[in-house]
Image (spheres, grey):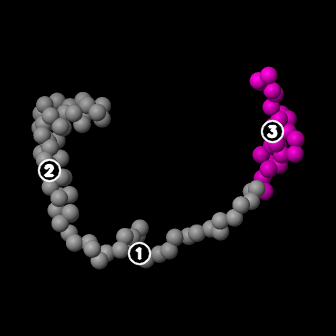
């Protein structure tokens, strides 16, 4: 895949980047070099490699999935103008 000058200018416009014709020509070469490197990476055989999140083997930290109220209901409504049993009271706005 290669990028032409029109594509570079279109991408720059979409990114809201002002580029001159000279800069666009330079970017065309740079983007084509980057895309060439990506094509090289696609040639690497990774069929036997497991996906990983780090170079060091480690397990993700997991917490117990349990529902609780957080123990902070009273703290949350402490500064409310009006509350009733840890619920906010608001004035009625619709009749």
Can you identify the residue that label 3 sits on?
A: 88
**Quadrant for the C terminus in the image:** top right
Q: Quadrant of residue 13?
A: top left
Q: Secondary structure at mark 1?
A: loop
State which tag comes first along the sequence, 3 or 1.
1
Residue occupying image coordinates x 58% and y 69%: 62
As drawn, which residue projects farthest toward the right? 84
- How dense is the environment of label 1, judged by Cα within 10 Å: few (below 14), some, or many (20 and up)? few
In front: label 3 or label 1: 3
State which tag comes first along the sequence, 2 or 3.
2
Q: Would you say the magenta stretch is mainly helix, strand or loop? A: loop
In front: label 1 or label 2: 2
As drawn, which residue projects farthest toward the top? 95
- How dense is the environment of label 3, judged by Cα within 10 Å: few (below 14), some, or many (20 and up)? few
Is residue 88 toward the left or the right of residue 42 in the image? right
Is residue 65 toward the left or the right of residue 45 in the image? right
Q: Is residue 75 magenta?
A: yes
The circle on residue 48 is none
| Residue 53, percent from left and from top | 41, 67
Can you identify the residue that label 1 sits on?
A: 56
Q: Secondary structure at mark 3?
A: strand
| Residue 65, percent from left and from top | 65, 65
What separation in Å lies between label 3 and label 1 (alpha carbons)?
48 Å
> With respect to residue 54, does 95 lie above or below?
above
Q: Secondary structure at mark 2?
A: loop
Can you identify the residue that label 2 sits on?
A: 1
State which tag comes first along the sequence, 1 or 2.
2
**Magenta residues, start to end:** 71-95
What separation in Å lies between label 1 and label 2 (alpha carbons)?
34 Å
């Amino acid at each position: 895949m290669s990028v032409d000058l029109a594509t570079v200018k279109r991408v720059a416009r979409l990114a809201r980047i002002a580029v001159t014709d000279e800069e666009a020509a330079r970017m065309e070469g740079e983007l084509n070099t980057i895309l060439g490197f990506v094509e090289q990476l696609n040639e690497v055989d990774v069929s036997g490699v497991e996906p990983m999140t780090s170079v060091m083997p480690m397990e993700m930290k997991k917490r117990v999935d349990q529902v609780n109220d957080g123990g902070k209901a009273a703290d949350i409504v402490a500064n409310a103008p009006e509350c009733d049993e840890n619920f906010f009271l608001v004035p009625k706005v619709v009749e």
